[in-house]
Each structure stands twice: as structure tokens, then as C-alpha cells.
Amino acid sequence: MDKESSQTNSHYWQDKQPALKFLDPSQVSMIEEALSIIGEFGEVRLIVEKGRLRFIVTQKSFDAQKWQPGGLSQKPKTSRVSV
């Protein structure tokens, strides 16, 4: 592989998908997991310190139109995960 080809390919994985610049695969998996636990409504926030992902904050919301007694006490509304 010549110098030009290696420089061009350095930002791509073998399957020609763009390589991750700021996240590693385990952090992507953690974000995917956070998105899956918030349910139908919610929010996932990424907290960055010094240019690096430091925390993932999840907030679960509940639809007041669909509320059932005892539905709010099942899990905490917010959680914070250190990366």
C-alpha cells in the first residue's frame, strides 16, 4: 500500500464505514444501552470533560395520559453513569 492510500484509509474501517473519532466501541455500546433503558420517552445526555466523554446521564419520562397507579415508583427517573 502506498503512502497516499494508507493516509486515505486511516479514517475508515475495513468495511468503509467512517472510523470513530471521539468514541471507542465500548462507549458506543454504553450509549446504545442508555437509549434502550429510557423507554418510550426520555433523554440521554453526554457530558464531556476536557474533550472526552466523561458521563452519560439518562432521564426517563412518563406520559401523563397513560399513567397507571404505581407506575412512577418502579425505577428512578435519573441515573448517572461514569465512563
Image: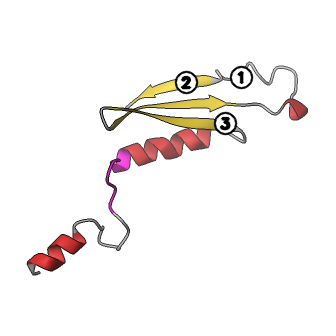
Q: Is residue 64 left or right of residue 24?
A: right
- Specify the principal SS of the magenta part: loop
Tell me the number on the disc at residue 74: 1
Q: Which mark sits nearer the N-terminus, 1 or 3?
A: 3
Residue named by callout 2: 79
- Residue 66 visible somewhere in the drawing: yes
- Residue 38 visible somewhere in the drawing: no
Which percent across, then down, holds residue 73? 74, 18
Residue under the point 72% across and 42% down: 40
Q: Is residue 10 left or right of residue 63?
A: left
Residue named by callout 3: 42
Helix, strand or loop status at disc 1: loop
Amino acid under disc 1:
Gln
Marks 2 and 1 in Cβ contact (< 8 Å): no
Q: Give the magenta part as a residue range.
A: 19-26
Amino acid under disc 3:
Gly
Q: Which mark sits nearer the N-terminus, 2 or 1?
A: 1
Between 52 and 38, which is closer to the camera in this rendering? 52
Check the image and report above or below for 83 versus 4. above
Q: Which mark sits nearer the N-terminus, 2 or 3?
A: 3
Q: Is residue 45 left or right of residue 10?
A: right
Check the image and report above or below for 13 versus 35. below
Between 16 and 50, which is closer to the camera in this rendering? 50
- Residue 27, image quadrant: top left
Which percent across, then down, holds residue 1? 11, 81
Whole-Å distance between the Cαs marked 2 and 3? 12 Å
